[in-house]
Amino acid sequence: MGLTSDEDSPMNAETSNLTPKKKRLQRGGDALKLEMHCHRDQKFRDEWCLNSQYKYWLKPVSNDVFRAKCSMCNKDFRADMSVIKKSCKWI
């Protein structure tokens, strides 16, 4: 026998929304965009230079408080702890 009522249908209200929330937000399908995490730029912190892993090569960029500089390879990058940790692996 075929499925005729909405209660017996496998596509009821609970299962009809199979697209993950993150994907729906990227597509603009939900009005919950305020829940998305926004990345905020970090300012360079002088205490990072006190850390023994970073103190020999990490320097602030003089004209941009949101960037840091590697004194060994002379490259600058965002002053973000995750980026600094990745840069530390290169050295």
Image (cartoon, helix red, strand yellow):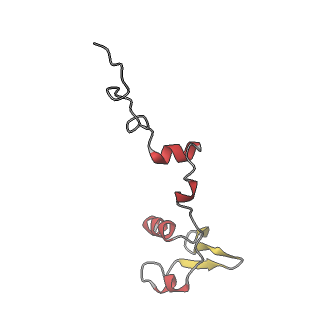
For image coordinates 46% across by 47% down, the residue present is: 21
The residue furthest right is 63
Q: Is residue 65 left or right of residue 30?
A: right
**Residue 23: x %, y % from top left:** 50, 44
Q: Does residue 44 sit above or below 8 in this rendering?
A: below
Q: Does residue 45 sit above or below 23 in this rendering?
A: below
Q: Nearer the viewer, residue 56 or 35?
A: 35
Q: Is residue 10 left or right of residue 87?
A: left
Q: Is residue 44 left or right of residue 2?
A: right
Q: Nearer the viewer, residue 71 or 27?
A: 27
Q: Nearer the viewer, residue 1 or 80?
A: 1
The residue furthest top is 1
For image coordinates 57% across by 42% down, the residue present is: 27
Q: Is residue 14 left or right of residue 73?
A: left
Q: Does residue 39 sit above or below 45 in this rendering?
A: above
For image coordinates 50% across by 70% down, the residue present is: 84
**Residue 61: x %, y % from top left:** 65, 76
Quarter of the figure that contains the N terminus: top left
**Residue 72: x %, y % from top left:** 55, 73
For image coordinates 51% across by 84% down, the residue present is: 49
Q: Quadrant of residue 4?
A: top left
